[in-house]
Image (spheres, rainbow, N blue to C red):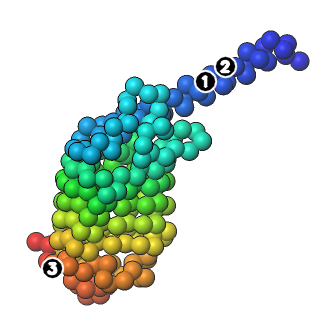
Amino acid sequence: MAPPTCFWFCLCLTLTTTLVISQVYANSEGDALYTLRRSLSDPDNVLQSWDPTLVNPCTWFHITCNQDNRVTRLDLGNSNLSGHLVPELGKLEHLQYLELYKNSIQGSIPTELGNLRSLISLDLYNNNISGTIPLSLGKLKSLVFLRLNDNRLTGQIPRELVGISSLKVVDVSKNDLCGTIPTSGPFEHIPLNNFENNPRLEGPELLGLASYDTNCS
């Protein structure tokens, strides 16, 4: 039987190691979020509490963490923000909700968002986001809500999204997408008005009869 002193030493060492690891993750996530803050214009000072000198970002406004101080929600919808998204957002491994709708965000959707394997909701609608929908979003196997409507997105609807069985809501209306609308997997139940006002987007694809990238050249 180990002496009591050894037991308490091992227990303290374990707790200290766990705390250090937790702080390392928290600091890494805080760094990623602060990088986002620096890329945004914030005239209403909604990000004023985002202080990078704090141990973790869990006390920042508009951030929610789990019991392990890992970031699970980013709620900045309708916050009068402009600027662009950053690849560092892909480091928020436990993020479940990314809510940045109804702002004036420009630029493209970072490919690194495909690393957010816990993501349930990706709401970027009503911005000025351009570029294509990243193929990497097909890796988000927990995704339920994908709302990218009212932006300036181009290119095709990635067929990689068809493999997300959890997907219940997709809205890409009011963009400049091309090609055809997927009809398999979760897209079988998505209303057609969630694809409207894309002048170059054809109706539901007829498998084997038309190329899905039609009108994209």
- What residue sits right under mark 3 in the picture? 199
Q: CA distance from mark 2 to mark 3?
A: 62 Å
- What residue sits right under mark 1 in the picture? 17
Kindly indicate the quadrant of the structure image that contains residue 146.
bottom left
User: Do labels 3 and 1 touch, CB within 8 Å?
Assistant: no
Across and down, in percent, residue 63 comes to 44, 45
Q: CA distance from mark 3 to mark 1?
A: 56 Å
- Of the residues under marks 2 and 3, which one precedes in the sequence? 2
All told, the count of numbered labels is: 3
The numbered dot on residue 13 is: 2
Q: Secondary structure beneath disc 3?
A: loop
Q: Secondary structure beneath disc 2?
A: helix
Across and down, in percent, residue 120 comes to 47, 60
Q: Is residue 146 visible?
A: yes
User: Do labels 2 and 1 touch, CB within 8 Å?
Assistant: yes
**Residue at 78% across, 13% down:** 6
**Residue at 38% across, 56% down:** 99
Q: Is residue 135 visible?
A: no
Kindly indicate the quadrant of the structure image that contains residue 125.
bottom left
Across and down, in percent, residue 210 comes to 23, 84
Q: Amino acid at mark 1?
A: Thr
Q: Amino acid at mark 3?
A: Pro
Q: CA distance from mark 2 to mark 1?
A: 6 Å
Name the outermost residue toward the left.
217
